[in-house]
Image: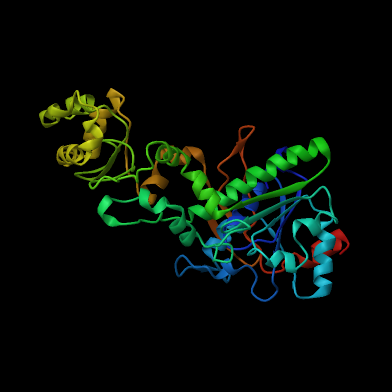
Amino acid sequence: MAAEKELPLTGLVVIDMSQFLSGPYCSLRLLDLGARVIKIERPDGGDLSRRLYLSDTEIGGDSTIFHAINRGKESLAVDLKNGADLATLRGLIAKADVLIQNFRPGVIERLGLDYEHVRTLNSRLVYASISGYGEDGPWVKRPGQDLLAQARSGVMWLNGDEEQGPVPFGLAIADMLAGAASAQGILAKLVRRGITGEGGHVETSLLESLVDFQFEVLTTHLNDGRRQPKRSSFRSAHAYLSAPYGVYPAKDGYLAIAMTPIPKIGDLLELPALDPFRDKPATWFTARDEIKAIIAGRIAEKTIDEWLAVLEPADVWCAKVLTWPELMQSDGFKTLDMLQTVTREDNVAILTTRSPLRVDGARTRVERAAPRIGEHSEKIRAEFGL
């Protein structure tokens, strides 16, 4: 890892007992800040996300998503049903700084590896638990899966047009948000440990993270009579914001237009049809479908570059909607240097993303790909005397 000695978490050992996405995303964020992450995997198959395919692409016997979220980590094979292996894991826990787990509630207790038991092995340990819906209540035993958490969170009613019904995000946002929240909690506990010498327990769930994700619009809902948000029926981009907020087709692609007063956009687009709405801000919401339809008809008459030449000099917040190839080819993306190739000795090479953070002006670069199952078992056992 480039410039490892300069990273904030260099020297910290993280035991990642989680699988799929939420916990591994959390440990990935810690790894990019310098931590050493030891991934605990079953000898017979490892992390289930090794076989979670987003496409028919397989690299070194594993899915691309496994490689993306586990780059740079080490793998220790442990059979949690084997007493000797459990003793080995407990010995490692006694020497670690952080432990992350996302077992279903009740499983970790049966293994005797819940926080109350583990803290007796290592009082300095920062222990993070991620669940689907918390530790209590009627949903505890339900599968903590991203799409199901989205379904229960209300977030699906914020996407798409009004007539579409609930629309899920096209990403595993519950997993990513829960992982990010856990990383924040772990970092806070590590800071506190530096003051008191004591570790602690950090908990979150997919549902709690999705509720927090919606804090702006939920606060509106809770304080305006608890009305259900009504999405636009035309080019909807936000359930609450008024016209012209949306994405509009131009001659050669799509143009996103954010918050802009209707008189200003009407003048710039030369749209007298918007005159009835100029001095009536309330109609920018109540008549937003009609207003957006008028704007859409005009945007469709020219190319994106023609419209950007009009709108950007007038400080209208707008942008071309890019495809991934267009993004990768853009100077703005290239300047960020967000891609890296990670490799492994068995001829595995994968192009993936880098950390979103720059520390002291530098972005972390990881050179090693995700591990094979148990690839580092012998080395870790010898190093820690297990």
Q: Is residue 158 visible?
A: yes
- Residue at the farthest left position: 272
Say left or right for 329 vs 117: left
How many labels, in total? 0
Residue 286 placement (x, y as % from top left) = 23, 37
Q: Quadrant of residue 319?
A: top left
The vertical placement of 209 against 149, above or below, is above
In the rendered view, does 23 fall on the left or right side of 92? left
Hey, which residue is sitting farthest front in the picture? 225
Q: Check the image and report above or below for 52 versus 29.
A: below
Between 227 and 3, the residue placed more toward the observer is 227
Question: Which residue occupies 74% across, 44% down?
Answer: 10
Q: Is residue 81 above or below residue 38?
A: below
The residue sitting at 23% across, 32% down in the picture is 284
**Residue 323, image x and y in percent?**
35, 49
Q: Residue furthest right?
A: 385
Image quarter of the C terminus? bottom right
Apparent side of residue 206 relative to residue 254 in the rendered image (left or right): right
Q: Name the image quarter holding residue 74.
A: bottom right
Image color mode: rainbow
Q: Nearer the viewer, residue 61 or 385?
A: 385
Residue at screen point 82% across, 47% down: 124
Q: Position of residue 88 (x, y in %)?
A: 83, 66
Residue 89, position in %: x, y? 80, 64
Q: Is residue 82 left or right of residue 238?
A: right
Residue 270 visible at all? no
